[in-house]
Image (spheres, rainbow, N blue to C red):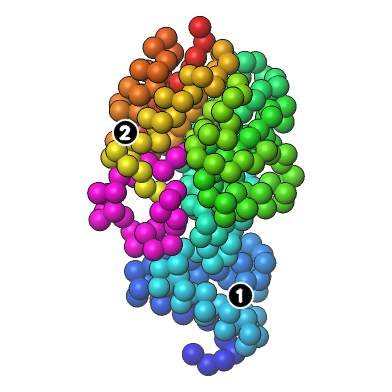
Amino acid sequence: MKKHNTVFEALHWASSFLTEHGRDANAGRILMQHLYGTDYTGITMRIHEEMPEQKWNEFREMVEQHAKGKPVQYITGTEEFYGRTFHVDESVLIPRPETEELIVGAIARMKKLFGENVELKLADIGTGSGIIAITMKLEWPHAKVTATDISEAALETAKRNAAHLQADIDFRLGDLTEPIAGEKWDVILSNPPYIAYHEREEMSDVVLEHEPHLALFAEEDGLQCYRRLAESLPNLLNQPALIGVEIGYQQGEAVAKLFQASFPQAEIEIVKDINGKNRFVFCIIDV
């Protein structure tokens, strides 16, 4: 391409180039919006503007990175979650929209179990970018929220997000519930690693080559973290209490059994996501 392209010409090139490489053609528009620091409307208004050479070179480089497999979110450094913008990098998983449904489900059950926006102690186990902990703090301001992660790099990313979004979170480094042991909690939420190692062959190269494996894979056919949570939580919970976890769509019955064994009197729910797949298990302890 010649050096001085209009925004329209650059977008047309990106769409064709990405399609040829098996990527989503719309990624070009998202990258262009990021480049200009604007939204869809803003880009539409610039559509016939000539791009400065430096901007064109930056845009081409970003498009080529995505064509090679780097996720758009790691190129732009951001992803939207629950109506807020979070910083993401390769130390953390890219937030998925299904996790928003974990928040919605947790809040609905918290209101029913505890009442509206009362003071609670809530822990997010394996916080990653901090999306669950930060969103819960902002949606339930009276909660005292703690977030744990085994990855120091992930915690740094989460702290950055908490500072940006002005959420007061107590971040603790450590494996699963170890950093919160010796205390009592009202709500435990977690989206832990749950992919079995043998499922690697079915996964996209984009995920495998860029997202942190520490946050993706777990032993025991992906169930190890749930087993360890179920075993450790009986000593850590007040009554009443709520546990909510995100799961792989084939793990519902297995995860429910683990929590039922630890909490025989609890109400266990396997909840489907918006696509009709089993995606969450809630454990309501109210005895």
The local secondary structure at tag 2 comes to: loop
Query: Circle 2: is it few (<14), some (14-19), or many (20+) Cα within 10 Å?
Result: many
In the rendered view, tell whether residue 34 sits above or below residue 169.
below
Query: What residue does disc 2 label?
Result: 251
Nearer the viewer's eye, disc 2 or disc 1?
A: 2
Location of residue 113 (image quadrant): top right
Q: Residue furthest bottom?
A: 2
Query: What residue does disc 1 label?
Result: 47
Q: Indicate yes or no whether the magenta region holds residue 175.
A: no
Q: Position of residue 230 (x, y in %)?
A: 42, 25
Q: Position of residue 43 (x, y in %)?
A: 62, 69
Query: Circle 1: is it few (<14), some (14-19), or many (20+) Cα within 10 Å?
Result: some
Separation of residues labelled 2 and 1 (CA atoms): 47 Å
* Residue range corresponding to the magenta coloring: 191-215
Could you say which is closer to the camera, residue 34 or residue 184? Answer: 184
Q: Indicate yes or no whether the magenta region holds residue 214.
A: yes
Q: Is residue 119 visible?
A: yes
The local secondary structure at tag 1 comes to: loop
CB under 8 Å between discs 2 and 1: no
Who's the residue at 62% across and 15% down the image? 114
Kind of residue at disc 1? Ile
Total count of labels: 2
Q: Is residue 11 visible?
A: no
Q: Which mark is residue 38?
A: none
Who's the residue at 32% across and 42% down the image? 219
Who's the residue at 72% across and 49% down the image? 163
Who's the residue at 62% across and 41% down the image? 172
